[in-house]
Amino acid sequence: MTATLTVAGLTAGYGDTTILDDVSLTIALGECVSMIGRNGVGKSTLLETLSGHTTVKSGQIVLDGRQVTSMPANGRVRLGLGYVPQEREIFQSLTVLENLTVCARPGKWGLEQVLELFPSLRARLVNMGNQLSGGEQQMLSVARALMTNPRLLMMDEPSEGLAPVVVDQLFDAMSLLRDDDDMSILLVEQKVDRALQFSARSIVMDRGRIVFDGPSARLSEDSHFLESLIGVGRRH
């Protein structure tokens, strides 16, 4: 099966501080993978490293067959890396429409397609980014990433700080994305049960290393094993 992402022996961090230690993983084209673990174990740092925002000390990152370990962040986007950061980072002083079109690239995901996925944004197209609710900002952040037509979509804690009904709406939309065979998904999510339900495969990180990479069902069916890996009870 064709690999969208291959990471081999990746050690990285910020400046002289090492966070990730010898991380290796492969995500196939069209595959959806959830990543879980306690706060501060390196999940967000891995996404930041894949995006080109940290210091790589050793190892390799290959995206869609291209070596990108030393490539600037904008080059990775052009190769098909979409990133929804934990802070959302929408452009507060631009309208919703401008947020969506400023980074648009040719492909199956255009304005009409993302508005069908997130209908609540349609009525907000002329509103500024800072006029949106938290849920609308998160939907806009995902929609904006889709407008780049990524081969790999990475999402960091998309449900954080959102009301349960909004989380349901977001995961309904994400489930549609999961069924897109042309795009792979790497989801970091603190709501463990949500993450395990979302992806057939899950990765557990601890202290900058991958300590489990396998079927989500293995973790769902054995709570003691799961808790031994992440060190805390399940978060719903």
Image (cartoon, rainbow, N blue to C red):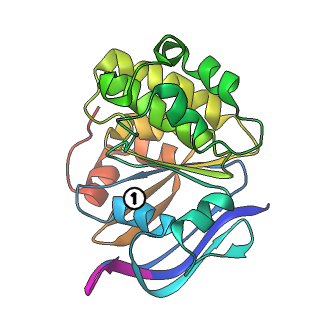
**Secondary structure mostly seen in the magenta stretch:** strand
- Looking at the rendered image, the quarter that the N terminus falls into is bottom right
- Find out whether residue 25 is within the magenta segment: no
Q: In the picture, residue 37 is in which quadrant?
A: bottom left
Tell me the magenta residue range. Answer: 11-18
Residue 169 drawn above or below residue 25? above
Residue 6 drawn above or below residue 182? below
- Find out whether residue 13 is within the magenta segment: yes
Report the front residue among 91 and 142: 91
Q: Residue at x 31, y 59 (%)?
A: 229
The furthest residue to the top: 123
Task: Answer left or right for 77 relative to 17.
Answer: right
- Looking at the rendered image, the quarter that the C terminus falls into is top left
Residue 83: x, y in percent?
50, 51
Report the front residue among 99 and 22: 99
Residue 175 drawn above or below residue 71? above
> Mark 1 is on which residue type?
Val
The furthest residue to the left: 232
The answer to whether residue 40 of the structure is visible from this angle is yes
For disc 1, the marked residue is 204
Residue 7: x, y in percent?
57, 74
